Image (cartoon, helix red, strand yellow):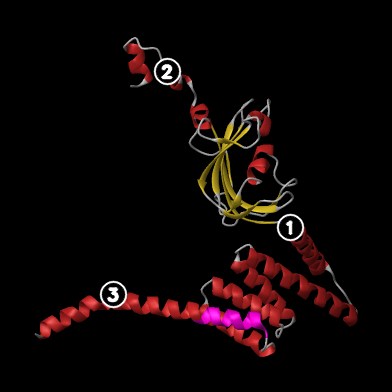
Amino acid sequence: MSVFSRLRNGIPPSRDDCQSPYERLSQRMLDISGDRGVLKNVIREGAGDPVTPDASVLVKYSGYLEHMDKPFDSNCFRKTPRLMKLGEDITLCGMELGLLSMRKGELARFLFRPTYAYGTLGCPPLIPPNATVLFEIELLDFLDSAESDKFCALSAALKLLHRRRLVLSEEQHLVEAAKLLVLLNLSFVYLKLDRPAMALRYGEQALLIDQRNAKALFRCGQACLLLTEYEQARDFLVRAQKEQPCNQDINKELKKLSSYYKNYMDREREMYHRMFAPCEKGSSVGRN
């Protein structure tokens, strides 16, 4: 029975009828702050270890005010979210606390009380004073503090090396060697973040410096395999094997590629068989 029906029939409203949507939702959520300032509801479980302090996270998020269907803040419209470092790039205390409770691949819904969100003043004109906000957050991946610091240092180093203009050929050689190392490490980090297109991009930049570099060829092969570009992956990995025939990692990746390619061809044959089987059956009937 609705609230209005209860009132018309002389029945006083129930406790639930007097609660706001966020108050009703909060009753089914887990308190992760200890003072019910940050409440959590897991929509999809993640895997692995939880996010570490000082990590850098790759997340998709949308923030909602009560009684509003459209988010007041979201990065879900971006093709690729940017990497954000805890303690530096995330301004909401509640979001940082929530992320520390999450695992890779997890999707969760959070309620942040004003103390953990925008405070007593809010953030005019979008956020009113003393607003409780709801955030849906998906943790795509994260780098722990050591990996994060390494990634930030590599990115900064690469920018500096790009800006450097040198005259002496000997100094230029040293810079190219340093640049090669940075590009190889960036390619590795993007593979770990499951962003093979970026890993391939930096691997190919490394090959412009040293076209026979086995690590660069291997990284490019790994990236192409993740992108299901099997012919290109084979080309890179065979070239890497030629440079280092006894490298176990390269040989294992070639075996993995062979297995993936076989499964891919089996699926293709099965699909074509399904597509043309009815035609073949019809033709045999016609002949009879």
Compared with 183, 119 (above or below) is: above
Which comes sooner in the sequence, label 1 or label 2?
2
| Mark carried by residue 274 | 3
| Mark carried by residue 14 | 2
The number of numbered badges drawn on the structure is 3
Amino acid under disc 1? Ser
Disc 1 from disc 2: Cα separation: 51 Å
Q: Whole-percent x and y of residue 55?
A: 71, 52
Q: Whole-percent x and y of residue 234?
A: 56, 83
Q: Picture quarter containing residue 253?
A: bottom right
Disc 1 from disc 3: Cα separation: 48 Å
Q: Which residues are drawn in magenta?
A: 247-258
Q: Residue at x 34, y 77 (%)?
A: 270
Q: Does 156 sit left or right of 282 as displayed?
A: right
Does residue 236 show up? no
Residue at which label 1 appears: 148
Q: Whole-percent x and y of residue 75?
A: 59, 48
Compared with 41, 10 (above or below) is: above
Main SS of the magenta part reads helix
